[in-house]
Amino acid sequence: MNLAVLLMIALLLTGCASHGGWNQSVTPGNWISIKRGDTLGELAKQAGVPLERLQRFNPGVRARSLAIGQRLLIPTHQERAPYGGPYRYQVRPGDTYSAIARHFGTRVSRLSAGNPGTSASSLRVGQLIKVPLSGSGASSGVASRSSSSSSSASSRPSPAPSTPLPSSAGSWPWPLEPHRVAREYGKDARGTLQPMLLTSGSSDKALAVADGEVRFAGSMRQLGRVVIVHHAGNLQSVYALCQSLSVEVGKRVSRGDTVCRTGSGDRGNELLFDMRSGGKPIDPRRVLR
């Protein structure tokens, strides 16, 4: 598996799951990941929004230098992005003041000041909030600061989830036994957050790490066959690069049940494993024993 494919896998996982869904529908309100051949003009046309409006809501994205896997916000018709701000932004699943501030190149303190009746802990999906921009310079200055902020933010792992992990965290079994960690969760040399890659020389069974319900069991572009299991405490486990599936959507699984059979690679049986808390990526070692 070459580096480009690994980067695509990591970015697809991060881009889709951390914003409330695994779809790539170019419709207002969604976050999407840039795919090979995409252009801002074509995406704006598919979404039914003016190109300038799409660019305004993605201040760190440059039309001439789109990167595969780069995250793009498709604005809704209720949102506004006047020159100089403040933006009118509609809260999406998994949003926090920190994440919103990073995307628009502003500060959490300015968000709090611009929304005196809304605390960071009481954001509601669909709620409209004001996003004041840092400084009051011309729009070109705003874009420059936003680009810098977005670039530095993309090189950092997502912040720790606000929802506490269950008391059982740290005792969950590994999904592949015996296993070897071929790649740890974390950033690569380009600063891109990547999920954990496990290999095994003898077992091809990917096992559920905890009791839960299968919410997705199917194929995804560049990920092969994928299983997503939702657990108590708003945790999700993701098993990708599967050769065949052993479960169906809606099935209840218990810890240790086989969810899929892994594919064989140069290093043996390979499983791409991802853990989420409230849709946000976390290091699996925080949960696994």
Image: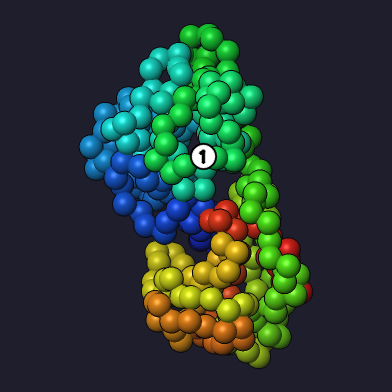
Res. 66 image quadrant: top left
Viewer-nearest residue: 172 or 8: 172
Q: Is residue 255 visible?
A: yes
Task: State left or right for residue 99 relative to residue 164.
Answer: left
Which residue corresponds to mark 1?
123
Q: Position of residue 15 (x, y in %)?
A: 48, 51
Q: Position of residue 181 (x, y in %)?
A: 71, 72
Question: Up-down: is 122 above or below 257?
Answer: above
Q: Amino acid at mark 1?
A: Leu
Q: Position of residue 132 (x, y in %)?
A: 51, 20
- Residue at horizontal 31%, vertical 41%? 28
Res. 208 image quadrant: bottom right
Question: Local crowd at mark 1 within 10 Å, few (<14), some, or many (≥20)?
Answer: some
Viewer-nearest residue: 138 or 235: 235
- Residue at horizontal 54%, vertical 9%? 136
Question: Up-down: is 63 above or below 18?
Answer: above
Res. 239 image quadrant: bottom right
- Residue at horizontal 26%, vertical 41%? 47
In the rendered image, the quadrant that contains the C terminus is bottom right
- Residue at horizontal 68%, vertical 50%? 160
Viewer-nearest residue: 215 or 180: 215
In the rendered image, the quadrant that contains the N terminus is bottom right
Q: Position of residue 42 (x, y in %)?
A: 27, 39
Q: Is residue 227 visible?
A: no
Task: State left or right for residue 151 relative to residue 63.
Answer: right
